[in-house]
Image (cartoon, rainbow, N blue to C red):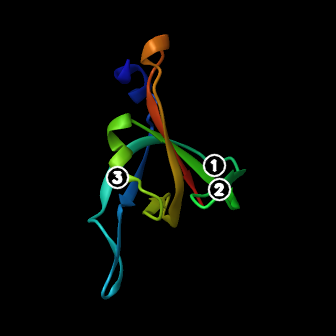
């Protein structure tokens, strides 16, 4: 099923996974380009602390990209830099639907 949904990934984003805070401030992994579908619909969502925030875009990608998008990661979409609010895995195997990852961006 993954190949069916991956054929819809007509966009790419560059992601720098958030690694945490060190002695010199926040740290990010090296940039990685991820094939995806970008939906730039504005939505009201909740962040990891439960606070309502506005998401400016949602990125849909393959489930294997889950570890690349922890909250706080930097993402470049169409030359604009933003950060990850949250991520969710959608497992459609039991329903014979394509599984995918949805990443909400600030």
Decide: is 29 above or below 92: below
> How many C-alpha atoms fall within 10 Å of the one at disc 3: few (<14), some, or many (≥20)?
some
User: Distance between the Cα atoms at labels 1 and 2?
Assistant: 6 Å
User: Distance between the Cα atoms at labels 3 and 2?
Assistant: 19 Å
Depth-wise, is mark 3 or mark 2 nearer the camera? 3
Q: Within the image, what quadrant is residue 21 found in?
A: bottom left
Does label 1 or label 3 sit earlier along the sequence? 1
Q: Within the image, what quadrant is residue 3 found in?
A: top left
Q: Are marks 3 and 2 in contact (CB under 8 Å)?
A: no
Q: Are marks 1 and 2 in contact (CB under 8 Å)?
A: yes
Across and down, in percent, residue 70 comes to: 42, 56
Decide: is 70 above or below 66: below
Farthest residue, direction left: 30
Indicate the secondary structure of the residue bearing disc 2.
Answer: loop
Answer left or right for 63 relative to 48.
left
Indicate the secondary structure of the residue bearing disc 3.
Answer: helix
Farthest residue, direction bottom: 24
Depth-wise, is mark 1 or mark 3 nearer the camera? 3
Across and down, in percent, residue 60 comes to: 49, 39
> How many C-alpha atoms fall within 10 Å of the one at disc 1: few (<14), some, or many (≥20)?
few
Q: Nearer the viewer, residue 42 or 77?
A: 42
Residue assigned mark 1:
40
Residue assigned mark 3:
68
Mark identifier at residue 56: 2
User: Distance between the Cα atoms at labels 1 and 3?
Assistant: 20 Å
Decide: is 24 above or below 92: below
Q: Nearer the viewer, residue 59 or 50?
A: 50
Across and down, in percent, residue 76 comes to: 45, 61
């Amino acid at each position: 099923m993954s190949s069916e949904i991956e054929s819809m990934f007509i966009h790419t984003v560059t992601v720098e996974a958030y690694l945490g805070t060190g002695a010199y401030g926040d740290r990010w992994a090296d940039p990685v380009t991820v094939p995806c579908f970008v939906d730039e619909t504005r939505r009201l969502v909740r962040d990891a602390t439960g606070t309502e925030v506005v998401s400016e875009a949602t990125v849909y990608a393959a489930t294997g990209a889950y570890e690349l998008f922890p909250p706080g990661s930097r993402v470049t979409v169409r030359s604009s830099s933003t950060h990850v609010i949250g991520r969710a895995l959608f497992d459609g195997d039991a329903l014979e639907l394509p599984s995918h990852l949805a990443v909400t961006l600030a």
